Image (tube, helix red, strand yellow):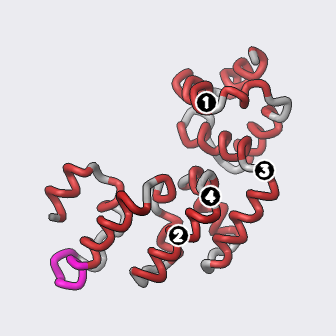
Amino acid sequence: MRPNVKLLIDCGVSDSNIVMLLRKWPSIFSSIQLLKEVEEVKGLGFDPSKSSFSTALLAKHTVRNSHWDEKVDVFKSWGWSDETVLEAFRRQPNCMLASCDKINAMMGFWVGELGWDALALVKGTNFFGFSLQKRIIPRALIVRYLLAKGLIDKDASLFTPFIISEKMFLQKFV
């Protein structure tokens, strides 16, 4: 365990991110693959000093290659390319921590129900980390209504309503 903690410290991972990894996945510190995973995540352009590095490392560590490939295939079934999946992972590494069912449900609602572009989700900060039932659907229905009535600009960010706090959402959109 100590050599892996030292490895992360030497790579520039912050103490708070190491603590987060210890809390969420202590087994990562006993992995003999950690150096390989760290190098792979760094090779993808993640900055070890940022929290996104820890999330990407967690995703690479916990999602087996076969499941990783399944998730890539799910995204591709919604019109994404390999490059798009990689871009989404770089922007929101937690997208690969979501189950295939959750990815399909999110995409199905976003594209099928709302008629919005699946590629727009590439830029969605932490979108796949939110609850579809508790956050995405209720807010999306309000946003769709406001758009239809011309009460919000059609060029406004589609993601702001989903990432702001409940209190802020109620103040701005309800």
Contact? badges 3 and 1 (CB < 8 Å): no
Q: Earlier in the sequence, mark 1 or mark 4?
A: 1
Q: CA distance from mark 1 to mark 2?
A: 28 Å
Q: Which residue is mark 1?
A: 21
Task: Look at label 3 and name its amino acid.
Answer: Arg
Name the N-terminal-most of marks 3 and 4. Answer: 3
The image position of residue 155, as x and y in percent, is 30, 76
Q: Which residue is mark 2?
A: 105
Q: Earlier in the sequence, mark 2 or mark 3?
A: 3
Give whichever of discs 3 and 1 has the lower sequence position: 1
Query: Which residue appears at 63% of the width and 69% of the height?
Result: 84
Q: Position of residue 54 (x, y in %)?
A: 61, 37
Q: Quadrant of residue 149?
A: bottom left
- Label drawn at residue 64: 3
Please name the residue shown 74% across and 37% down the image: 38
**Callout 2: helix, strand or loop?**
helix
Q: Residue at the location (70% across, 20% down)?
A: 5
Query: What mark, if any, has residue 104 been given in the picture?
Result: none
Q: Which residues are magenta?
A: 145-152
For the residue marked with disc 4, what is the amino acid?
Ser
Q: CA distance from mark 2 to mark 4?
A: 10 Å
Q: Which residue is mark 4?
A: 99
Let me know if residue 58 is in the magenta part: no
34 and 45: which one is in front? 34
Mark 4 surroundings within 10 Å by alpha-carbon count, few (fewer than 14), some (14 through 19), many (20 or more): some
Q: What is the three-letter code of the residue carrying label 2?
A: Ala
